[in-house]
Amino acid sequence: MSKYKNMYEYYRMQDVLPTYGGFQSRSDLEAHEQYRRRLFTEKLFLPSRLFQNARMIEFGPDSGENSLVFAQWGASCTLVEPNPKAHPAIKEYFQRYGFSHRLVSLEHADIEGFAKHCQLLEEYDIIDAEGFIYTVRPESLWIDLFARLLNDDGLVILSYCEAFGSFIELLSKVIHARMRRLTGMSALEAAQKLFTVKWDSIPHIRSFESWVMDVLENPFVRLSYFLEPDSLCSQMHEAGFSLYSSWPSYKDALAVYWHKKTLTPDEQIQSQSRFVAHSRISHIFGKQLFLSRPAPEEMLWNLVRLTDSLIDEFSDETVEQLLELLAVLSHMLKFEVVYSDPRDREDACRALESITTIMSTLRKGSIDGIVRFCNTDSAWIETWGMPNHFAVFRKSASLQPTR
């Protein structure tokens, strides 16, 4: 049970901001802008011109790197950030890069506080809430707030930790927690021993220390907080939103029908639900592994639940149950995947073999074996899963809320 009521309280107690990139030059901003441009245009189908003169509110901008990009694209930005430690960084960034005129307001509030005191109705064209939103419960608190704030045809941009896609991230937390209990090391020292090679294998704009704080030690990066796409889409639908785009895709990319045919909102939800059900193994490994049938959801929930439980208490019995489920998953990868790049299937099978190995090594309590595995096993080093999902929803005047 976390001693923090919400994530921003956890952040407020830390020495580093979770996503601070430490931009020093115009080229730092330009590099980040290019990354965001590719994400928004190629994966979420949101061209940068859409933000020109848009009235935008961003919840939880942290240090404001993403906010700078929205301002650069021409958005008028209202930023709502509950962590006061982030405010000086935001103000300094906007002033240094010449976007102060785009910063309409910087509010010190969390979602609950903002919702309680906000009287606005249909004020914004775009709402952005990335990274933290999955921790705010109940979900209706922010979904209903967004419905109040957004103009018709306005867009909500979300990113969140997804339940099945976070399997590898949960496993990393298991390894880290086991190492700390076996050695008495600090969080950072254990992480450096275990994950420096893995971290250095892909590019990042934030520091290794911030990742340790924001993922490995974060009490809110746990299964009880994670969202699941089918449920999220249904809740948004009930509030009058339709799915515009997502990454990975929740819409049936294999569907073929006459272009003049229009699916009803209920048909769209059903189609998305089926496609997501066939894609869950893809989310677990972050690779194209479309199944011939809907993934056995109960089995996969058990897989992530058991993994999550090992963070708090490492037990041989739980490991044994997990190994049995990993064997079932291995069979699915080998015999039930019907649409995949052969290399993706091979990589996923290798990763699963590696995960089986590390679970056995953790059970033995071999410190040298754990360190050696994490620093030399190529399949493990290359596997990250798909923990962070993006979803864009459109508020439709014709889609009436049902709750």
Image (cartoon, rainbow, N blue to C red):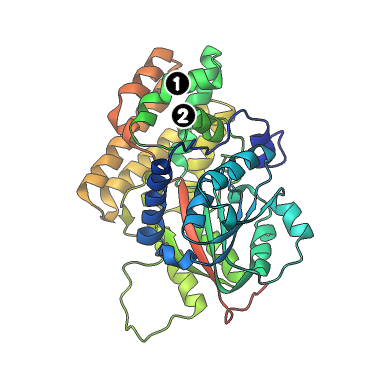
- Indicate the amino acid at tag 2: Phe
Element carrying mark 1? helix
| Residue at position x 30%, y 76% in the image | 256
Percent position (x, y) of residue 155? 53, 67
Disc 2 versus disc 1: nearer the observer = 2
Answer whether labels 2 and 1 touch (C-beta < 8 Å).
yes
Q: Is 203 on the left or on the right of 316, as rendered?
A: left
Q: Which residue is mark 1?
A: 192
| Pick the front one: 240 or 124 | 124
On screen, residue 242 above or below 2: below
Q: Residue 137: where, in percent of width, then height?
A: 68, 51
Please report whichever mark, 2 or 1, sits nearer to the chain's N-terminal start: 1
The quarter of the picture where residue 203 lies is top left
**Rendering coords of residue 132 (x, y %):** 59, 47
Q: Quadrant of the C terminus?
A: bottom right
Checking the image for residue 208, the label placed there is 2
